[in-house]
Amino acid sequence: MGSKQSKYPKLIKKINKASNDIRQNDECPQLAKQDDQYIDRMQLFHHVIRCVSNGNFKVPLNEQLKEGGVVVLDFCCGTGTWLSEMASDFPNSTFVGIEKDSMYPEHKPKNVKIVQANVLEKFPFQDDTFDFVYSRLNFLSFSESQWKNHLIKELIRVLKPGGYLECIDHLGTDNKGPILEKFSFAIEKVLIQAGRSPSLASKFSDVIEFEPQMGKVTLTEVIVPIGSWGGELGLHIKTHMMSGLNKGIMHHLKISEKNLEKLWDDFKIEVNTHRTIWKINRYISQKN
C-alpha cells in the first residue's frame, strides 16, 4: 500500500479530499449520482447478472413460486426491474420491495408492493413474513458494522424458518492492468474513508453463518468479461463501467476531461490486453 501512495501522491491528495466530502453525507453515500445514466447502469447490471446466472434467482423455490402463495422481499429494490420480472413470471406469488427513495415506476403489477422506509431502522414487517429474501449490489451502500449489527439481523428476522436468503454482490475485478489498478486503489481508498468495506463481499459467508438461525452458505462465483474480448456483453460492461466512474469517483477526484479521455482510450486497450474480468459472488442460505 505504501508504494502505491508514493507512486500517486497527487492522486492520493485528491482521494483524501473526496473522502472527506463523501463522509459529510450521513446516509448511504453514493459514489455514483442517481441520474438516468445510473438507472441505465442498474438495468444493465440486472440483465448481465440474469444472463450469466441463467435466471433471476437460484434458490430452490421455482415450483412453489409457480404454485403461488410465496411472499418475496427485494431489499433495496432500486429501479424494481427484478421485482417486475419476477412478478410477471410468477403472478400467483407476492413481491415486496423496500427502499428509502423508490425509483419504481408509478404503475406496477398487482402482485408488487413497494414499501418506502429507512432500512437502518427496524424493517416495517413482522417476524417470519417472507419465504424468500433477495439482495443485490447493496454491500457498499452500507458500512460493515451496519451489515453485521443491523441489516443481516433484520433480513433474517423477517425471513420465515425454512425460507431462503440470496445475496449477490461485486467481489471485484481481476487481471487488472495499471490503469484499473489505479482506479481500484482510488475507489478502495474513498470507500474505506467513507466507512465502507471493499472486502465485505469476500467474507459475507462468515457474516451470514455467524447468525445461529442460518444454515451453511452455498457460495458461487460468477465471472463476467470486461471489454470487447468478451463479445457484446463485455463491451457493454466496459462502457457502463467507464460511465459509472465518470459520474462517480472521477467527479470527486476532479481529473481533467482531457486527461480522462486519454485514460479511457488506454483503458479500452488495457482490458482487452489483460482480459480483465468482473467477479460477482452469490450467497444462498436457508433459515433453520
Image (cartoon, grey):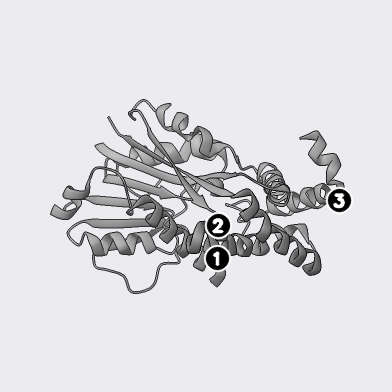
Secondary structure under tag 1 reads helix
- Could you say which is closer to the camera, residue 199 or residue 154? 199
* Residue receiving disc 3: 10
Which sits earlier in the primary sequence, circle 3 or circle 1? Answer: 3
Work out which quarter of the rendered image holds the C terminus and state it.
Answer: top left
Q: Which mark is residue 229?
A: 2
- Residue in the image at 53% along x and 64% along y: 236
Q: Is residue 138 left or right of residue 97?
A: right
Marks 3/2: CA distance?
33 Å
Marks 2/1: CA distance?
25 Å
The quadrant in which residue 127 appears is top left
- Residue in the image at 20% along x and 56% along y: 93
- Could you say which is closer to the camera, residue 271 or residue 44? 271
For this orientation, the residue located farthest to the bottom is 107
Q: Amino acid at mark 2?
A: Trp
Task: Decide if residue 35 is in sight here.
Answer: no
Which sits earlier in the primary sequence, circle 3 or circle 2? Answer: 3
Q: Which mark is residue 38?
A: 1
Secondary structure under tag 2 reads helix
